[in-house]
Amino acid sequence: MSKLTRFLATAFVFLAAWLATLLGYVPVPEIAMEFVPALPLWIIVSFGAYSLASIGWSLVTFGDCPEAHQELLQEIQQAKADLRRLKVTVD
Amino acid sequence: MASLLTSLMGGSSATTRVASGDSLGLAPSDKYSVLLPTYNERANLPVIVWMLVKVFREYGINYEIVIIDDNSPDGTLDIAKQLQDAYGKEHIVLNPRPGKLGLGTAYIDGIKRATGNYIIIMDADMSHHPKFIPEFIRLQKQNNYDVVTGTRYTGSGGVHGWDLRRKLTSRVANYIAATLLQPGVSDLTGSFRLYKKPVLSKLISATISKGYVFQMEMMVRARQFGFTIGEVPITFVDRVYGESKMGADEIVGYLLGLFNLFAST
């Protein structure tokens, strides 16, 4: 089963259960009916908020490693000097 | 072990490291083949080869570098021949091809030529630094991993030379992929990796995608086959010479490829 079919199957089961509850086929306490209608929207909004927070956090903590750049530039100079000695063309 | 001996003998391990694979847990028969697909890398190739040789010599690692050049008009192959003269045919293996045939087939051709039992793939443009290779080897040996992949996104890893927009694109792309595919690897599109040779052969033959999605599919397939994967934080210095390209076409291609993988694995 592919990831897509698994996702669709899960979504279908959830939506069916949600509809059945909404239409009164599943007995739930009165109080639950206060939030059951908003459940899918709530899930979507939560997922969106989680995604934004997750991407935002990973942007803030993105490593810039300027020292790796410096080190590389120095090493390139060393390499070029040595390569010329080995008769390799370096521009 | 090697450093202990050196210090007992009064040598300075900081300046003259003893060339020995002991600290990495190498077996005498271990050989590492680096596959370097090149296209117009005349400026980068000699430097990356020099840095590779430096690391391999320092750690006493048995190695070869397979250069797969797709008939670069800038004469990359001539430079590769000079490198072969400088470092020897047993260390520099040339695999020229008649034209631009793509990354997937470059690896297939490279594997055919490779004589090592381990394969390292990396970019030839110096965005990947060979100094991380001993870390890859050490981690692979410790846990007998089938694959070790470099990650820019955890621990001490990072990227130099990206503006906010490029970082955001990369983060969003990686987030969508991680959410849809659940690969358990933090850097899906990375291309600095160490493979056991048979593992890479099997993954390549199972992988159909191209471009950015190619590297991603390799990880997804690896999970599918039940291969074990380790991660090493790496720094990525975006092209010092030349420009790195990431346009709208690439993004659309990436999303389509991602969806294909989502629907097919």
Image (cartoon, coloured by chain):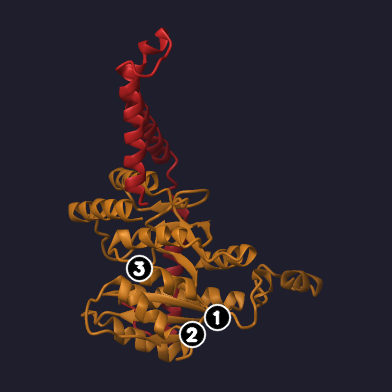
Q: Are marks 2 and 1 in contact (CB under 8 Å)?
A: yes
What residue is shown at x 40% (from left), y 55% (from top)?
B188
Q: Residues within 10 Å of mark 2 (few under 14, many from 20)?
A: some
**How many residues crowd mark 1 within 10 Å: few (<14), some (14–19), many (20+)?**
some
Tags 2 and 1 both on a single chain = yes
Kindly report which numbered mark, 3 or 2, lies closer to the viewer in this rendering: 2
Instruction: Tell me what hue chain B is rendered in.
Output: orange
- Residue at 66%, 77% in the rendered image: B20
* Left or right: B199 as drawn, with respect to B60: left
Task: Please state the horizontal and vertical placement of residue B70, each as a whole percent of the image.
Answer: 26, 79
Q: Is residue B59 visible?
A: yes
- Colour of chain A in the rendered structure image: red
Q: Secondary structure at mark 2?
A: loop
- Label 1: which residue? B31
Q: x%, y% of residue B132?
A: 52, 64
> Which mark is on residue B125?
3
- Image-quadrant location for residue B94: bottom left
Q: Say which amino acid is labelled 3.
A: Asp
Residue A77 visible somewhere in the drawing:
no
Residue lying farthest right? B8
